[in-house]
Image (cartoon, grey):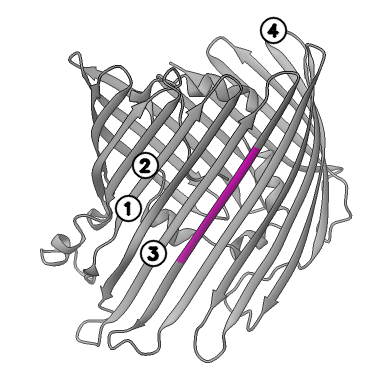
């Protein structure tokens, strides 16, 4: 799950910002335990690596990954990037981003106006509208460089919830209470990328500055305070060329959320942090077959400090995967794989109102998948086969299935 990405290809088509207050406020480490196989589900739900180069070309594009997490939860991740020229040097863009999952959820789109600078850069302005006017964001973004120059730099400075305080002092819908900021949040982000003949490096980060919001719980009653800050960063590296290739991903996200009385007493703190490293080694066996080995290690930590009893969640996540991909024709390829995850879980304190973890466990799954291309449409589907005895009913040996679509316009 990389929240900060560096997009290669034509600079004018890159999405400007990759996080929001909605993303940080919904981020949860413990909620992932509602799906006992969440880690391998998210790995299976990824877009095929063979599509990455085509997506990185930019242009008018769409992709979506969907599938089942639990009997009641459906995973959805969708991106749509469209742009229309305004004269010779300016563009209007529409960038949709949707992710509905058990780790964090967002569903919004950005309207952007961009002006190209030279051959490899642009500056622009984004507007992120919401039905709730107090949640709307806006701000400048920029990008310089490309693969041809080797170095790429992208940045943004988003003004979060820009109309919140204005909305608080104007007429509002009957029955709603104002939530003005005492300390307003901003969201700067910076992404760096470098590409050589056989090496690619990417480094990125987003910081949601500490904010304090004043909540009017009921009219005429003492007000409460709500605070939020967060940060997310990632690093990736690709080294080598065929027949051997090595990839490394590292990712970290942390959030601190507080609730308390206006006088600063009885503050409740919810701090969560998740980090992960993943390395993959791929080897080509001839022109049609590739074998890839993956090892992932990560940790999740969520600490609640409510009165009267603090509570804690902690997890060590490990996963290994071996996968084989075979090209069957110019349009079709197939893949098979085996996955195993090992989670070591510690849950302390009262579980009232919390997700109850299945506890320390192993999960095993076999994979069968197919990818195909039909003109400018790419489709993929992966069937997961259950290899464990589960406490819940499993239909035959079917475990989880995910499918992906990508299209160019």
Pick whichever, 193 or 174, lies toward us.
193
Q: Residue at x 28, y 60 (%)?
A: 185
Res. 187 mark: 1
Compute the Cα span from label 4 to label 2. Answer: 36 Å
Q: Earlier in the sequence, mark 1 or mark 3?
A: 1
Q: Are marks 1 and 2 in contact (CB under 8 Å)?
A: yes
Compute the Cα span from label 2 to label 3. Answer: 17 Å
Residue labelled with disc 4: 330
Indicate the secondary structure of the residue bearing disc 3.
Answer: strand
Res. 17 mark: 2
Residue 254: where, in percent of width, then height? 50, 61
Left or right, 252 with respect to 409, comes to right
Q: Are marks 4 and 1 in contact (CB under 8 Å)?
A: no
Residue labelled with disc 3: 229
Mark 4, Cα crowd under 10 Å, few <14 / some 14-19 / many 20+, is few
Task: Check if residue 249 falls in the magenta segment.
Answer: yes
Task: Check if residue 306 falls in the magenta segment.
Answer: no
Q: Earlier in the sequence, mark 2 or mark 3?
A: 2
Q: Residue at x 13, y 61 (%)?
A: 166
Q: Are marks 3 and 4 in contact (CB under 8 Å)?
A: no
């Amino acid at each position: 799950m990389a929240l900060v990405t560096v997009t290669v290809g034509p600079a004018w088509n890159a999405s400007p910002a990759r996080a929001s207050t909605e993303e940080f406020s919904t981020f949860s480490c413990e909620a992932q335990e509602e799906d006992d196989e969440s880690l391998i589900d998210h790995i299976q739900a990824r877009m095929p690596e063979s599509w990455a180069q085509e997506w990185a070309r930019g242009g008018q594009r769409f992709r979506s990954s969907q599938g089942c997490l639990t009997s009641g939860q459906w995973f959805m991740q969708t991106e749509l990037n469209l742009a229309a020229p305004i004269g010779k040097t300016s563009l209007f863009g529409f960038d949709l981003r949707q992710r509905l999952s058990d780790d964090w959820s967002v569903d919004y789109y950005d309207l952007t106006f961009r002006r190209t600078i030279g051959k490899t850069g642009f500056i622009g302005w984004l507007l992120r509208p919401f039905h709730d006017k107090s949640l709307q964001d806006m701000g400048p973004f920029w990008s310089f460089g490309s693969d041809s120059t080797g170095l790429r730099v992208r940045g943004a400075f988003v003004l979060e919830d820009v109309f919140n305080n204005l909305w608080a002092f104007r007429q509002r819908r009957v029955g709603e209470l104002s939530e003005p900021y005492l300390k307003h949040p901003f969201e700067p982000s910076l992404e760096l990328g470098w590409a050589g003949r056989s090496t690619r490096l990417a480094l990125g980060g987003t910081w949601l500055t500490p904010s304090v919001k004043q909540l009017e719980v009921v009219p005429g009653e003492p007000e409460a305070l709500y605070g939020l800050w967060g940060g997310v960063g990632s690093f990736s590296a690709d080294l080598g060329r065929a027949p051997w290739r090595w990839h490394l991903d590292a990712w970290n996200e942390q959030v601190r959320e507080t609730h308390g009385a206006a006088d600063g007493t009885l503050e409740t703190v919810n701090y969560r942090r998740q980090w992960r490293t993943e390395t993959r080694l791929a080897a080509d066996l001839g022109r049609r077959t590739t074998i890839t080995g993956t090892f992932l290690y990560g940790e999740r930590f969520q600490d609640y400090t409510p009165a009267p009893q603090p509570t804690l969640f902690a997890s060590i996540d490990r996963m290994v995967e071996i996968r084989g991909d075979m090209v069957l024709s110019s349009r079709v390829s197939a893949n098979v794989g085996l996955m195993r995850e090992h989670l070591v879980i510690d849950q302390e304190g009262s579980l009232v109102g919390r997700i109850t973890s299945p506890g320390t466990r192993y999960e095993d799954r076999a994979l069968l998948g197919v990818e195909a291309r039909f003109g400018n449409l790419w489709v993929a589907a992966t069937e997961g086969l259950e290899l464990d005895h589960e406490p819940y009913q499993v239909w035959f040996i079917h475990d989880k299935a995910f499918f992906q679509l990508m299209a160019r316009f």
